[in-house]
Amino acid sequence: MQAKLKQTYNYAFLDEGSKKEIRRATLKAVAIPGYQVPFASREMPIGRGWGTGGLQLTLSLIGDHDCLKVIDQGNDDSVNAISIKKLVQSCTQVKITTDSERATLIQTRHRIPEVPIRADQILVFQVPLPEPLRMVEAKERKTKQLHAEMDYSGIWLRLYEDIVKWGKVSIGADYPALAHKRYIFAPSPIPRYDLPKLHQADGLFLFGAGREKKIYAIPPHTDVEPLAFEDYPFEVEHFDGCSCRRCGSTDTFLDELYDETSGEKFYQCSDTGNCQKRQEMRQADL
Amino acid sequence: MGYVAVTGGQKAIEAADQLNLWYRLKDTEHSLETTDIEKQLRHLVDRVMSESGLYAPNYAALAIKQAEGDLCEAAFLMRAYRSTLERTYESLTIDPGRMRVIRRISSAFKDIPGGQILGPTMDYTHRLLNFSLNHENSAEMMNILREKVPDLKLSQPPVFQKVAKLLREQGLLFPPKSSGTLFDITRDKLSFPAPRSAKLQILARGETGAMTALAYSNMRSHIANHPTIGELRVGYAEVTIAYPLDASESICLGEIMITEVETINAFERDEQGEVKLRLGYGLTFGQNETKAIAMAILEQSLETEGPSPTQDEEFVLLHVDSIEANGFVSHLKLPHYITFQSKLDVLRQTQKIATATADKKRQINAQKEGQNDAGKAETNI
Amino acid sequence: MLGYRQLPKTTGNEAGRPMTHNEMRPLLSVRHLTKRFGKGCSFCRQPENLPPLNNRCPRCGTVWACNDLSFDLYEGEILGIVGESGSGKSSLVQCLYFDTSVTGGTATLSNYQDGETNIFLESPQQKRYIRNHLMGMVYQNPWTGLKMNFSSGGNIAEKLIAAGHFNVHHIQKRAADLLDHVEIPLSRMNEAPRNFSGGMQQRVQISKALANRPPILLLDEVTTGLDLSVQARVLDLIRRIQHESRTAMIVVSHDLGVIRMLCDRTMVMKQGRCIEAGLTDQILEDPHHAYTQLLVHSLL
């Protein structure tokens, strides 16, 4: 199967023309932080909604000098992450890693690695729903106009009504934020915990929505402000008093699990690559 | 942890691949021949070609075999393959008016020049399970059929004038809307309002069931639109390209089977005040009659304005694609525990706030009551 | 000839108080406002070609909803626009609030870029600024002006947010004050107006329109369809607002009774044209135009 792909398909699956077009859209996205650039998304050999947007970005950028890390929910060994890695490997000769610090390109679904992204790294997000205003406006034509005129009172009102009803904003992941004081964008369904990592970062963040045919970006050193009222500040997830059962960390995003026999709740790092490194370091210290 | 390690996820995927093969072959003595699929499951092949937008009966048969008969999966296999193919040529416009017709009906007229041709259709078969197919002898059957079915290729190829042309000559139809430059939905970025050529392309490879349901809603409830089929024709049309060395010459690449439907809708008044009929247009690869009719209904509905979902181009065009709809609905099978954790956190915080608010209210009420009681006590004294 | 006649402006004496410098200069000046539905043709583009008392071009069928309207609105005054349905009065306020685009004409606001800019030609962003800060609109149908599935407080919040307020506590306080002002019980602030009666919905709409203290309020048939007692309460509220805040208002109504109760000056419209204008009392006592006479007589 893998050998055959190499013969039948172009390097990195996409034809060079398509790659060029995607890179052009990406350049435009970098030039206008948070603005959703439409592109002619190609059909990929993985399901629409299963990371085709991120995959197209990755394939348009990747070369043999690259070292790739793919995570789903922070996990390198998730079947979906494995499946994507397998596909990239079958049409390129790139190295694969689970160590985010060794990777030049990281494709992710729903998480940002714990170790900050460096200036020489690119983080590619898989995006299911790129339009943050969709929750208040169903029509694409209309949301486009709202962005153009920076008419954002609708989404703010949605947050206000949440506070009236629930005492706080009820959005969990995919929390809308303002990119460089201009465009409201959807950070993809990363937890709120990860959102501040986009603000004034060193690395480049690219967002690809294959089914919705949009590319957008948060370039290095861009202001990213989560939408929040002055007296109801933005809050990340709470893990007070919890620690990772494997590496003992208390300053990472944790998965909540239940022990098979005792039924007891315990926590574990969501970033498996980082957790592994911490465990190794802990063992070396002993 | 090095990058060569084989992990649990990798093993699981490999096992899943093997299990697919195992379940496909374990209870059978021979593997299904793709030619049997191609030749005997015509409508299945036609549907896969139509929804994938790739006319390749042998590949469609292979995709059906590989997908174990899952239509969406088969169309997806074809679509993913098609997406990597180079565009070598653009064909000249196909003229369905000149196609080699095997079936042709009009419900608008009792008879039409050239006549109604029922052709191959199950429309008038009784839906009774034919148990003799369990033990069909195809050689014997073919001997009988050879005597009965005339060889169409030997007789004069039946080329018929289109019903729409007759109506047009009498000045009863609006001229077809011109598309201007041709939009390519696989290569250009779509934005709304969509050009007409993009609408037709999306509908032509839309999912049959989704399109039928939408067209049905258009006919049944929202606008109670009941178009008349001016003409439905099924047959073979030539695909030609311009001769590279002399554009006035063309080269025929072969034939494809298509279904074309023209529906006649309500008449309307145009800007010049002329009253004419509007045509709805549907065209699909293969023999896909219901889909072609649904396409004509939806295409026409999108040309009108109103409250029906079928008049909303974003609603129709963004939801009829099999690959996109299936992909997104099925992606719910992927792990979502990070987003769920985040939601759980919000829920727990909200519960805390609710409890705190309720406690506060209770306190205030208790205080009030205490004051009232005190007041009462005083007056009692 | 049914041409435009300059409205006499309210003088200090009539209002029973001295005129200030601000009142000398109109808050809103509209000149030659024209709105047509249809392409128009060489015939009807000459307004004098249109048949008298008909705004539909006999040649091309274009409807001239507003035909060459000019008037001024001064601080603290209420200008009435009266006419039958189809006279173009609703189109006029919709044009002023940018709900629909004008075909021609100008409008300037003395408190916007020093009254130098034709607001009809501004960018959508600038128009939104004007809608959120300088004008409020109350529609005949509360479903147009309110988000029925959001809370009443939220409806007001929307306006406040649009004007750059991002403090929930302050927003809630302001919304509570506004709702209290229009006599909506605070206990219903977090309820959606879809559960309210027509009169209450109209009062929520008024409070929403007032959220950012706009100097100009446009009211389009706001009491139409309400019970008489409910009508009286809404009219009372409008008068109270005008007395307290000196908000200038344009009141559109087919009901001369409403106009008589509220308006200092009045413009009578028919078939997209202004056929008579002046002090409301004058018009009621001594109507010049036959149509106005008809209106006044039917009132008596």
Image: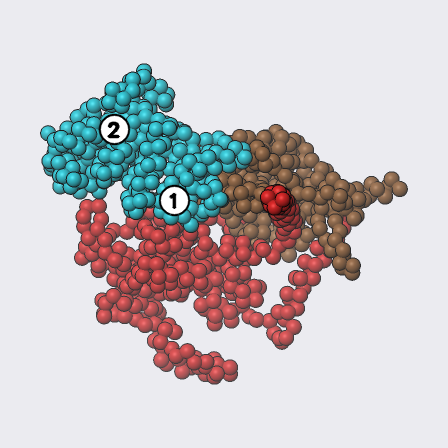
Label located before the other in sequence (2 or 1): 1
Callout 1: few (<14), some (14-19), or many (20+) C-alpha neighbours within 10 Å? some
Q: Which residue is mark 2?
A: C264
Which mark is on residue C200?
1
**Residue in the picture at 84% in, 42% down:** A282
Callout 2: helix, strand or loop?
loop
Q: Percent x, y for residue B23?
A: 64, 69
Please state which amino acid type lies under the numbered disc 2.
Asp
For chain B, the rendered hue is red
Chain C, which colour? cyan
Classify mark 2: residues with Cα within 10 Å, few (<14), some (14-19) or many (20+).
some
Residue B45 x %, y %:
47, 65
Contact, mark 2 vs mark 1 (Cβ under 8 Å):
no
Q: Amino acid at mark 1?
A: Met
* Residue B213 percent location from the top left of the image: 41, 62
Looking at the rendered structure, the number of numbered marks drawn on it comes to 2
Is disc 1 placed on a helix, strand or loop?
A: helix
* Residue A89 in view: no
Instruction: Please say if C41 is above or below A254.
Output: above
Q: Residue furthest right?
A: A286
> Which quarter of the rendered picture does the C terminus of chain B lie within?
top right
Q: CA distance from mark 2 to mark 1?
A: 26 Å
What tint does the image give chain A? brown
Q: Nearer the viewer, residue B248 or A5?
A: A5
For this rendering, which residue is in front, B367 or B36?
B367
x, y (%) of residue B227?
29, 62
| Pointer 2 chain | C
Q: Is residue B315 visible?
A: yes
Judging depth in this view, the residue of A104 and C243 nearest the camera is: C243
